[in-house]
Every structure is written in C-alpha cells, then in structure tokens.
Image (cartoon, rainbow, N blue to C red):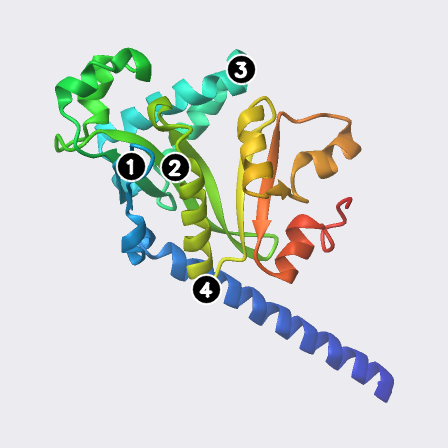
Amino acid sequence: MDRKKQSVSKDKKLKRKEELAKKKAIDETVRTAAAKAAPIEEFPSFLKYERNGLNLQLEADLGEKLSPPLKQYIQDLLKLNMEGPFGPDEWPAEEKKKRRDMVSPDARYIIVREKNLSQDSKFSNDSNLGLSDHHHCAGLWGANGGDPVVAFVHYRFIVEHDVPALYVFEIQLEQSIQGKGFGKFLMQFLELIARKNNMKAVLLTVQKRNTRAMAFYTQKLRFVVASISPSRWQDTLTGAEMTYEILCKTFDVEAKAILEEGTHLGAET
C-alpha cells in the first residue's frame, strides 16, 4: 500500500474513532441525566408559582411509580384536552399509546398541585373543570389526600440524530389555570432543566389542529418546525400529509444545523 492510501486509511480510522467517542459521550450525557429521579429538585426556587392569582406547588414523579389515582387523573386530563385536537378517528389509538408511554421507566414527571384550597370549594367548581366528582376523589386529590393536582408534564431525556435533547411528551393544564402565564413558566423551566443537564435542544410534538398550541410555541416561545418533522420530508416523499408537527428549540450551532436546518439529514431548509 502506497503512502497516499495509507494516509487515507489512517484518516478514516481516526475519523471513525472520533465519531464513536463522540457518540459514546452523547449517550453517557443522556444516561447521566436520565438517572436522576427528580431533576426539578435541583431548582428549589422554581418549585412554586405564585402569580396571577395562582398558588401552585411542583413536585417530581416517575412513570413507573405513578399511583393508580394519579394515572387515572392523567388519563382523564389527556382525554379532556386532547380528544378534540386528535379527532374521534385518531384519538382511540392515540389514547392507548399514551397510556403505554405514561408508565415508561424513562418517563419523568412534573406534578402540579394547587395550594390552599378546601375540598368543598374545589368540588363546587367541578363543572368548570370538566371532571366528575369521582375523578376528583380518585385522582385530583392524590393518593394521600393532599392538595389537588391541576397540571402535569411528562418529559424524557433522549438522543435525536446525535443530539442530546429533552423531549416534552405531554404538558397538560386544567382550564382553570390556563391563560395565567403558567404554561410559559413550565416551558422555560424545562429549558432550564435541559441546559443544566447538558441537553442541546428541547423537542415536542403538536397536532396541527391545535392552532392555539402551535401559536403558543412558535410565536411566544420561538420554537421552529424541526427538520425531522413530517412536513419537512415525508410530504415530499410520499405525498401524504401528517396531522402533527415536531417543533424544536436548539442551544448550540451543531444542534441547530441538525434539528433546525437539517444540514446532516438531507432535509429541506
């Protein structure tokens, strides 16, 4: 083998070694983050939200350790908020998938409770919340009879096209606490958690029918349609139009090139 071929072969081996080392480092970053049972507890000042007439307390939970009442509450709030955007044809299958996702060992939760409310006063507002008394007793008030749950977030630490990312699987708020800045607060908190754990992006999925949510993420929070979203590639390949978009916000140049610009994916920009 001549010197030129030897040099090319050596360069290829070195590049491959660097790529493997980089992949190993990324995987280790995500494993380290995912090993934390309660990442939110690293930010004690963010565990309370006392603004706009709300008095909320945030606590951590794990998908594999959710109590039966809390599982039921999550299912009920998901149906209440998401059956409309998905539609009657898609929702039954999606609901089954969400039930499986809900209890994954990888699932990390932020459970939000409303402080300083009596059960009597809370039950008097059942019709406004759209949940029955049974659901309040079994789920909203929690397994230990504590303050009522009024929102939850389900998130995970993942690797997406060699980018370590925090993926928001669900962020669901009761109607009674919407429009008071809390959704924006939660998303900013999740971004902080992502950065603290060396993630390079936040990702989430939004139904196209959910125009209010789409405007919230893209206009208020400056998320963009990700290069891995179906509208960026699948429509052109199959002619099919999917009912959802994947949105992202990236934190460094490389992540932006991959997940926003699609530089390494062959996606349209």
Residue placed furthest toward the bottom: 3
Residue drawn at point x = 73 percent, y = 25 percent: 240
Residue drawn at point x = 58 percent, y = 45 percent: 248
Alpha-carbon span between mark 3 and mark 4: 39 Å
Report which residue position mark 3 lands on: 87
Determine whether, in the image, residue 220 is placed left or right of residue 70: right
Alpha-carbon span between mark 3 and mark 1: 27 Å
Instruction: Kindly identify which numbered label has been placed on residue 28.
Output: 4
Mark nearer the N terminus (4 vs 2) = 4
Amino acid type, mark 2 = Phe
Residue 139 in percent (x, y) is at: 23, 25
Instruction: Kindly identify which numbered label has been placed on residue 182.
Output: 2
Vertical arrangement, residue 153 with respect to residue 29, above or below = above
Disc 1 crowd, CA 10 A, few/some/many (<14, 14-19, 20+): many
Determine whether, in the image, residue 256 is placed left or right of residue 148: right
Report which residue position mark 1 lands on: 112
Amino acid type, mark 1 = Val
Secondary structure under tag 2 reads helix
Residue drawn at point x = 38 percent, y = 37 percent: 182
Mark nearer the N terminus (3 vs 1) = 3
Q: Nearer the viewer, mark 3 or mark 4?
A: 3
Q: Nearer the viewer, residue 259 or 2?
A: 259
Mark nearer the N terminus (4 vs 1) = 4
Alpha-carbon span between mark 2 and mark 3: 26 Å
Q: Are marks 1 and 2 in contact (CB under 8 Å)?
A: yes
Instruction: Kindly identify which numbered label has been placed on residue 57.
Output: none
Residue 14 in percent (x, y) is at: 68, 78
Amino acid type, mark 3 = Gly
Q: Nearer the viewer, residue 189 or 200?
A: 189
